[in-house]
Image (tube, rainbow, N blue to C red):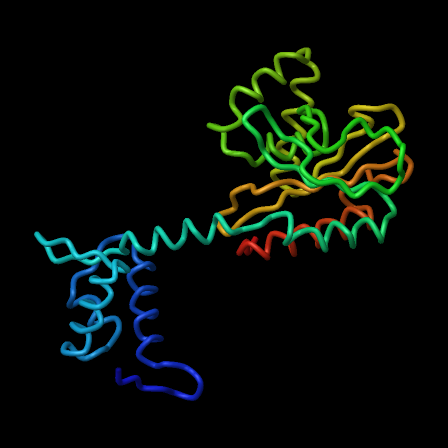
Amino acid sequence: MNETKAGTTIQSLQIGFDILELVAAHDQPLKFNEIQEKSQITKSNLYKYLNTLTQSGMLYRDRENGLYTLGSKLIELGMKALNKEDLVDRVTPFLQDIHQSYKQTVLLTSWSPNGPIVYKMINSHQGLNIGAQIGTQLPLLSAAGKVYAAFMEPALIGEWLSLQLNAADDKHQELVKQEIEFIRQHGISFAREPLVPSISAVSLPIFNYEKRLLGAVAVVGFSDRMPRQLEEPMSQELLRIGKEMSGLFGFKG
């Protein structure tokens, strides 16, 4: 197989990737002439690239109108890549750093059909009752619970959210809705003694490249050591760490 190399890269492979990105960047399917005009590849070479990409499933060519769109193989590969996004392995170093910096319990939570649950815990105070352990289902009024209420897809959380809100009186429902708007705006959640007296928490979302919520991290400890406002240094540092964690999954907020 003849390959044209530029330095340590394969130029023909890079051209193929560029064509895929060109097609992906447009909302509408593209004609051959449109791809040729935008890519400036000679027609004879472009035919070869498009035929190869189509045969491999990377592109799809509609037989009736000749328009090109992204192919099913790319979708298949994308799904496999998403399934390998090991949230726990990737964010554990950040959880450990938070634990070392603030000497507080750190939780990684994920969504389940019945609501958010604690998936991983780094406990700073063995024997201290923080109201949660691995497998604990968290309520709406917890710091992490409010993160899910703010950012999780409505279709997934609708029933859980309705049940949780219905359990509160009108005054508390309105306060929770105000908090959810604050979380959406600032990306951080505070909860003052939601589960156990004297124990408070702060929580951060972890997003992927589509700003879909992958999970939430919560820092839990004695109330006098937990931040209560956005402007506090601990809040700002946790926001920075949260953005860095989401960046691992392609988020560019």
Q: Where does the image place residue 19, in percent across and percent down from the top left?
A: 29, 68
Give whichever of 65, 110 is nearer the camera. Answer: 110
Q: In this rendering, would 67 be left or right of 192?
A: left
Q: How many marks?
A: 0
Q: In this rendering, would 134 be left or right of 65?
A: right
Q: In this rendering, would 39 be left or right of 62?
A: right
Who's the residue at 58% across and 50% down the image? 86
Who's the residue at 70% across and 27% down the image? 136
Q: Where does the image place residue 47, in percent across and percent down from the top left?
A: 16, 72
Q: Where does the image place residue 150, in percent across and percent down from the top left?
A: 59, 33
Give whichever of 42, 248 is nearer the camera. Answer: 248
Give whichever of 233, 164 is nearer the camera. Answer: 164
Q: Residue furthest front?
A: 1
User: Where is 110 relative to 72, above or below?
Assistant: above
Q: Where does the image place residue 64, in percent across and percent down from the top left?
A: 8, 52
Who's the residue at 18% across and 73% down the image? 48
User: Where is 11 relative to 170, above or below?
Assistant: below
Q: Residue furthest bottom?
A: 7
Image quadrant assignment for residue 174: top right
Who's the residue at 84% across and 53% down the image? 100
Give whichever of 95, 172 is nearer the camera. Answer: 95
> In which quadrant will I find the N terminus?
bottom left
